Image (cartoon, helix red, strand yellow):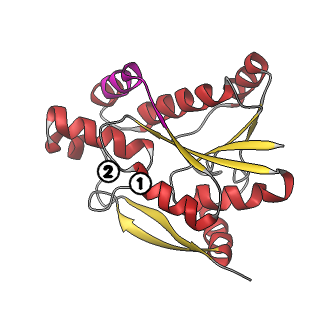
Amino acid sequence: MKVTTLFSGGKDSGLTAILLEPFFDEIELVTFSFGHDRAWEVAARAARAIGHPHRVEILEGEVLETGLEMLRRDGYPNNALNYVHMCAVEILAESCEYVADGTRRDDRAPVMTASSIRSLEDRHKMHYLRPLAGWGWRAINEMASKYLEFEVLPSDRYPASDFEVGLRYALAERYGQSEVDRIFPANHTHSRVVRRKLF
């Protein structure tokens, strides 16, 4: 069996891939991009370190435009991140029987509601998996530290390969850094997988 996993190159999506290994013959890691930057390269390097095939999917311009509109209207990122995440999952669900991501129990965004998950699975006759959904931040850090070497970095200086980076980049390019600072929280960090620990 094959599972396709949304992959940012961070510890959460890296741990997700490792947790799925006993159950699937093939794990494909997919990073979504708006096509305006090369932040996906972070995820490509992390995928090589973990040892699973990786590919990049480009989201259509309409997804970016709607996401930017939501950001500017709301003044905070959660709804836009949820929207972009849902679009990405929908794209994979069209051709993949099993789709996974690294969203956690305590995540506020991106996250899907139980009703939207049921709708997704019913419409596409597929299975959506969230291996970290029952785990808190501390437990995930401990588990990830056992299997992965990773670094935690400031997002504004060292971009990750996630939806937020693409939205930040496009927002700054079009409306200026002050608009990014208005909408996104300061002192945000993310993790990057450096290597997989061998036992």
**Residue placed furthest toward the bottom:** 199
Task: Specify whether residue 64 is painted magenta.
Answer: yes
Disc number placed over residue 7 in the picture, else none: none
Residue 88 relative to residue 173: left or right: right
Question: In whole angstroms, how far apart are the C-alphas of marks 1 and 2?
Answer: 24 Å
Residue 72 relative to residue 18: left or right: left
Q: Looking at the image, do the residues carrying marks 1 and 2 touch, with CB atoms under 8 Å apart? A: no
Could you tell me which secondary element the residue under label 1 belongs to?
helix
Q: Position of residue 69 (x, y in %)?
A: 31, 23
**Residue placed furthest toward the top:** 123
Q: Position of residue 178 (x, y in %)?
A: 14, 43
For the record, the magenta segment spans 57-69
Q: Residue tagged by mark 2?
A: 185
Q: Residue tagged by mark 1?
A: 41
Could you tell me the amino acid type at mark 2? Answer: Pro
Choose top left, top right, bottom left or bottom right for residue 125.
Answer: top right
Q: Position of residue 9 (x, y in %)?
A: 51, 57
Choose top left, top right, bottom left or bottom right for residue 174.
Answer: top left
The secondary structure making up most of the magenta span is helix
* Residue in the picture at 74% in, 16% down: 123
Q: Nearer the viewer, residue 100 or 141?
A: 100
Could you tell me the amino acid type at mark 1? Answer: Glu
Can you say whether 161 is above or below 147 in the image? above
Can you say whether 65 is above or below 174 in the image? above
Can you say whether 84 is above or below 168 in the image? above
Residue 17 relative to residue 56: left or right: right
- The quarter of the rendered structure image containing the C terminus is bottom right
Mark 1 or mark 2, whichever is nearer to me: 1
